[in-house]
Image (cartoon, rainbow, N blue to C red):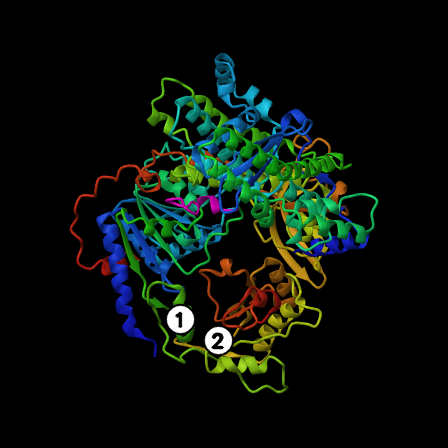
Amino acid sequence: MPQTHLAEGRNQVLTALLEHVERADALLVLKAPPGSGKTFVTTRAVALAMHRKRRVAVAAQTNAQADDFCRRMAAEFPRIPVHRWASAQRGALQLGDSVTWITRTADLPAGPCVVVATSAKWAVADLDAHDPFDVLFIDEAWQMCWADFMLLGTVAPRFVLVGDPGQIAPVVPIDVSRWQTSRRPPHVPAPEVILRDRTLPVRVIELPVSTRLPHDTCAMVQSFYDFAFESWSAPGERRVLLPPAATAHPVDDALALLTTGSVALMTLATPPGGPPMEEDVALAQAAAEVVRRLLDRQARVVTEEGETTLRPEDIGVSATHRVMNTRITDALGALAPKVRVDTPERWQGLERKVMVAVHPLSGVTQPTPFDLSTGRSA
Amino acid sequence: MSRHDVFERLRAWDEGGAIPNGHTLPWLRATAADRLVLAFVRMGGESSPWGIAIGRPDAPPEFFTCAEPRNADLHAAFVLAAADALLRHVEHPSLLPDDERLMLLAMEAPLRARVRLRQLWVPGPSHLDMLHFLDFRYTHANTGEPKVVRRLQAFGRACGWLFRESTRPGQVRVFDATARLRRAYTFPAEPARQSHLGYLLAWLVPGRTRDERLADAREREGLPVSVTMSPAYERAVLEPLVTRYNAARDDAPAQAAVAREIHDALVPELRRRWELTAQAMSILDADTRESNPHLDAVIDLGSAECFHEYWKNEAKGLDPSLSDEQRRYLVHDPETDYAPARAARRYFAHLHAAELAAGELVHGDATLAEQSLDAGNGFRGTIRAVEREAIAGKKSGPILWTIECSADDSLRLREETSVCLVGARKRIGRIRSLVTVGAVRTVVLQMTDGLTRRALPDVPEAADVAAHVGTTVTFLEQAAAGFTQMKIFRVGHTDGPGAWLTHAAPLPEPSPPVRIQANLLELVKSLQ
């Protein structure tokens, strides 16, 4: 049985967010662990703000996130009109009956509205000819550095920043030592800069439950967060069921671990000639083999919702380098279009029933540079 | 290290010496008049220089030393003596007649042209750090005669700007000779050894075998080239002299004599560092490779940076009507970009500089393009189809190019990435899809820019099926430099409604109190 008693805590956080919107306070930061319902609570807060006749702006960090947010609004609040403001170079997408696709600043609506765009779009938009927005919701705010956030000061006077503090910080391709001692370092995630400044009138709330992560995975990632949260699922509630195999396969021992817990570790020995540099074809093939074997054995997945057969669409693969991901995609062959392969930062906010993570460590618990350069495991 | 780096280092070892890296050099050769070579030495444990060698490469350097660098007055006097050469090099406005200074301040372009190719060369990174130390020590100097203090402050600010400029990606103003040699050549040595300028130069001596060069390099690396001298030399030669100098504090003639001895002991150390730098510069000048033909934008950005980040404020600061408080705002803090908006502007400026340098230079050097391709930042393949996408209700849809590549090649790019055509960089496409089947990776590009003869007169139009199908093309990731540049300007806008948070403007009026509805969860549910 799921830990239903945790629902009360989540409702309290949602109520706190809605009260913040109702009072039209200036600044709120919502910390949320993976799969804790960030979008769920944000869509509700946006709906309430719109109901109160406010002009609501929503900033997502990528076009895909902005599109997803619109789809969720259309599905859950079909009576609330939403404007998806995108680049003219992107073809219009059908995101739902209540979503209008616009590309020109002149098409921004007057009066109460919900407008969803990427942070980059808001950052360079000239909004002088329009009424200011009342509130700006920033989704996946930990993926946005302070310098980029500064550009959003032209959008609205009130801010709600929603994000996962355990996510990977924005990738900065330049040397940032010059700004390490700045009062507001431009390269640091915006919520961190805000939370460091004790003079700001900021309210912080934390979502307490992850519905995405199984019980033991929650415990594993907890150390990356400065607040406690629990898994919606009870210990041992989620697992993979594997029918007996007709023939033996090298990855079966690792897969057997998934029948009792949510994490299985499989290692691959470093070849005699030393580790490959960035693309590891053998490791890519091993990752693809795990996927293929799960499907060949017709694995079934048990969750709080019941038992289902594992489909290719339910599996994801992640490696830290894009070139490595290309190799894994190649190794997946015909399965590639259905099994998503991507880098960890692109997986943020997404979920699959089973994830295969290709990790550059060799299983050591205290990795040193030596381990990082020589080890590999899947 | 990339595969290319490993391969090239092994090749250098096989050839027995340094081998060229790339088809071009990513900077322009300047005349001796535009160049200044600068080297420092410092007393062990101190952060300020003990001696300075400075001069144009076509003349012997001047040597300035300080007998006792821990004495603040002596140190200031020594720095003051060396300051002129550096201030002349950066065209400090205080050295110009008033009318010329005002004209340059008003017109910008003449000053930018004047400093366009100015280069400061130092032996290595520790000498760049010394510029930062001098910035800390003298930018806020406040004791002494006003005229002297102003000159010391100007020197500190010049050092500070040059140090900051040295950290801007792609800059061609401040040259760390060791780093530039490593950029221009591949050396058959491990990275730690390649930090020594003398060691690198030994690998570049012509007409020798590998063993001879290696023996020479090992011998040369025994002599220090950083700002720190050999501890043995300091202990045996300089320490007794400094002790004698301090002991003679009541005997001015004797003290002056010891000061001359200290000077004579420091000069060989300074000379070696200065000459190694000049030698590195000569070798790079004599290299048969051309400069990268796409450097103009990079150099123009450098001259704009010089004007806006340094010279303009220096010139404004000379206005006698300014109060000390007003003048203070023209001075950059040695530690960091203190104001958040300024920090964000510089952050975007550095991002823009990095994107510009990478995006421009890769089109002027086939090796850079190959390295970029090897790193997965692009693809090469054969065009299999050129077609217009049919869109209901529109006369003509976007042009799509279908390109087949080898699936064995690395690829970092993903859907939505913009790429530009090598050889016709204004032709830009956005990746629509990437599909790998067997050994073939098929990329579908939606062509977005540089489609017509008007945009690119020398190449067939993007929609020309006959001209393109069957040809091999190379696309590299398109740098989004213009977008970041826009952010540099926009981040300075302090008048937005949210500026209270983003730009520390006054807090907004609190919202009037509202009565919170009893059950907001139910209210929201009713909206669904």
The part of the image, by quadrant, that contains residue B335 is: top left
* Residue found 50% across the figure and 52% down from its top: A171
Horizontally, residue A223 falls left or right of residue A172, namely left
Check the image and report above or below for B155 versus B402: above
Q: Amino acid at mark 1?
A: Cys
Q: Is residue A237 left or right of residue B36?
A: left
Using the image, determine if residue A367 lies above or below residue B222.
Answer: below
Q: Which residue is mark 1?
A: A218
Q: How many marks?
A: 2
Q: Chain of mark 2?
A: A
Which quarter of the picture shows residue B175?
top right
Which region is colored magenta?
A: A175-186
Classify mark 2: helix, strand or loop: loop
The stretch drawn in magenta includes residue A92: no
Q: Residue B309: in sight, yes or no?
A: no
Residue ID for mark 2: A263
